[in-house]
Image (tube, helix red, strand yellow):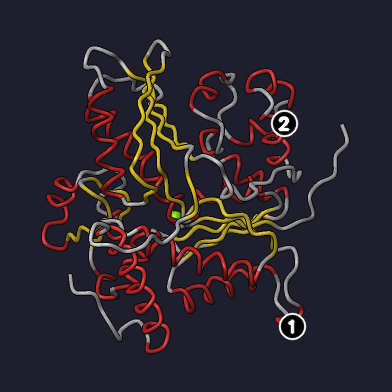
């Protein structure tokens, strides 16, 4: 088989502990504290907290037990995170080519052309961009660079935080792949891994097998996975922000369960991803639907319609709590959750009235965040702090 290897340069860029970095941007005195963002459970933790094994989905009561007095718990502020994310994406659009937003704090970019005036090689340019993002947006980021987007994404398992990795020649890429398990390939889900032949343990083993073997096993997605792994640029994560619906789903894999706390915690992860996407794209929704799939693969769903379009976290969260209580049956074993909305629109400010407290708060917060950003930009990050 003949194919043309990619000569393009792609980078996967990910902000380090993004939610925590945003909180530190707003209040620099948090930089030395063990910060956890979430509500009852941790959805983002500072690297100092992670070093003490307080990671995503550790409940706050447990985190408090581990971190004692230095523990700082903060409610997620998706509007601030959305604003800083926009600044970050805008920076990437100004300094790189073909930016593809992957999540609120991750993007793929092309780095094939480096401005001639800078007179830098690839590594120097990566370090230059990393420093510039920290200086201008106050967010530390990590870079992984390779010949395809998938290769770059895979390397994001290494050299973090505030690190970079450049794997441009095939030899160094395959050397690294020999050290990495198949489970590090994104999109090769747990149930595919279960079906792989026993000798396929590393990403290198996967990339050296015949493409047709994987096609039989995984289906049509195998083709681009295999090509991308072998250095052939064949994938685009093209912007998915102009969607007509938002859907987040999560399978429990081998942990099928009837435990309501376990199922709710898995569902919360979907909900957080939903909020992230809503904040980044400035979406609001009028409808929310929840599905629970049973062990026998039966799907049960229930919906809630809001009075008006909303992006209010509390309102959506409470609606989901009620839906979950109605749908959940203690005698059923569940295998996955699904949450989504097909009725969405771009956020539009509504007329203020004494009845629209939530909206008023949204507008006030937005104005306040803008003032903060401007003051920090002009007088430095130490100039003004939020009292907590
Ligand atoms: Mg990140």
Tell me where residue 362 sits by quadrant.
bottom left
Q: In whole angstroms, how far apart are the C-alphas of marks 2 and 1?
A: 39 Å
Q: Name the residue under label 1.
A: 117
Q: Residues within 10 Å of mark 1 (few under 14, many from 20)?
A: few
Residue at image point 28% right, 60% down: 48
Q: Which residue is found at the position 85% from the left and 39% from the top?
A: 3
Q: Which of 247 and 36 is in front in this view?
A: 247
Q: Is mark 1 on a helix, strand or loop?
A: helix
Quadrant of the image occupied by residue 285: top left
Determine the residue positioned at 23% across, 23% down.
259
- In the rendered image, which residue does mark 2 sit on? 223
User: Which quarter of the figure is the C terminus placed in?
Assistant: bottom left
* Disc 2 Cβ-to-ligand 1 distance below 8 Å: no
- Give the farthest residue toward the bottom: 379
Front residue of this view, candidates 74 and 164:
74
Neighbourhood count class around disc 2 (C-alpha, 10 Å): few under 14, some 14–19, many 20 upward: some
Residue 218 image position (x, y, % from top left): 63, 23
Position of residue 191 in the picture relative to residue 149 (left or right): left
Residue 136 in the image: above or below residue 361: below
Of the numbered discs 2 and 1, the one sitting upstream in the chain is 1
> Which mark is drawn over residue 202?
none
Q: Where is residue 116 in the image (x, y as percent from the top left)?
A: 76, 78
Q: In this view, does 147 lie to the left or right of 359?
A: right
- Relative to 114, is 220 above or below? above
Question: Where is ligand 1, by quadrant?
Answer: bottom left
Q: Is mark 2 on a helix, strand or loop?
A: helix
Q: Point out residue 264 in the picture as x, y percentages from the top left corner.
A: 27, 32
Q: Which residue is drawn at 30% across and 56% down?
A: 76
Residues marked 2 and 1 touching at CB (< 8 Å): no
């Amino acid at each position: 088989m003949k194919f043309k290897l990619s000569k393009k340069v792609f980078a996967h860029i990910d902000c380090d502990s993004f939610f925590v970095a945003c909180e530190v941007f707003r209040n620099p005195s948090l930089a030395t504290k063990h910060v956890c963002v979430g509500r009852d459970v941790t959805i983002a933790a500072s690297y100092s907290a992670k070093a003490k094994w307080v990671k995503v989905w550790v409940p706050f009561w447990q985190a408090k037990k581990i971190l004692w007095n230095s523990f700082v718990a903060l409610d997620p502020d998706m509007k601030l995170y959305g604003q800083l994310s926009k600044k970050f994406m805008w920076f990437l659009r100004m300094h790189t080519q073909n930016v593809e937003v992957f999540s609120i704090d991750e993007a793929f970019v092309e780095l094939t052309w480096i401005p001639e005036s800078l007179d830098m090689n690839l590594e120097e340019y990566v370090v230059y961009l990393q420093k510039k993002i920290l200086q201008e947006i106050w967010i530390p980021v990590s870079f992984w660079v390779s010949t395809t987007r998938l290769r770059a994404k895979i390397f994001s398992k290494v050299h973090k935080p505030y690190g970079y990795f450049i794997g441009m020649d095939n030899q160094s890429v395959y050397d690294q792949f020999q050290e990495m398990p198949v489970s590090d390939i994104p999109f090769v889900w747990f149930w595919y891994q279960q079906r792989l032949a026993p000798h396929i343990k590393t990403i290198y083993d996967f990339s050296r097998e015949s493409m047709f073997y994987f096609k039989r096993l995984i289906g049509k997605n195998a083709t681009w996975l295999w090509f991308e792994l072998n250095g052939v640029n064949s994938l685009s994560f093209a912007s998915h922000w102009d969607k007509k619906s938002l859907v987040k789903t999560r399978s429990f894999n081998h942990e099928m369960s009837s435990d309501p706390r376990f199922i709710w915690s898995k569902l919360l992860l979907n909900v957080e991803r939903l909020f992230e996407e809503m904040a980044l794209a400035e979406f609001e929704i009028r409808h929310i639907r929840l599905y629970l799939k049973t062990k026998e693969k039966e799907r049960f769903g229930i919906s809630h319609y809001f009075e008006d379009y909303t992006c209010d976290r509390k309102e959506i969260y409470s609606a989901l709590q009620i839906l979950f209580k109605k749908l959940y049956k203690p005698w059923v074993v569940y295998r996955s959750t699904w949450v989504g909305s097909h009725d969405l629109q771009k956020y539009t400010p509504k007329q203020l009235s004494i009845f629209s407290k939530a909206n008023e708060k949204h507008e006030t917060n937005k104005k306040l965040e803008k003032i903060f950003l401007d003051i920090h930009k002009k007088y430095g990050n130490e100039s003004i702090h939020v009292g907590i």
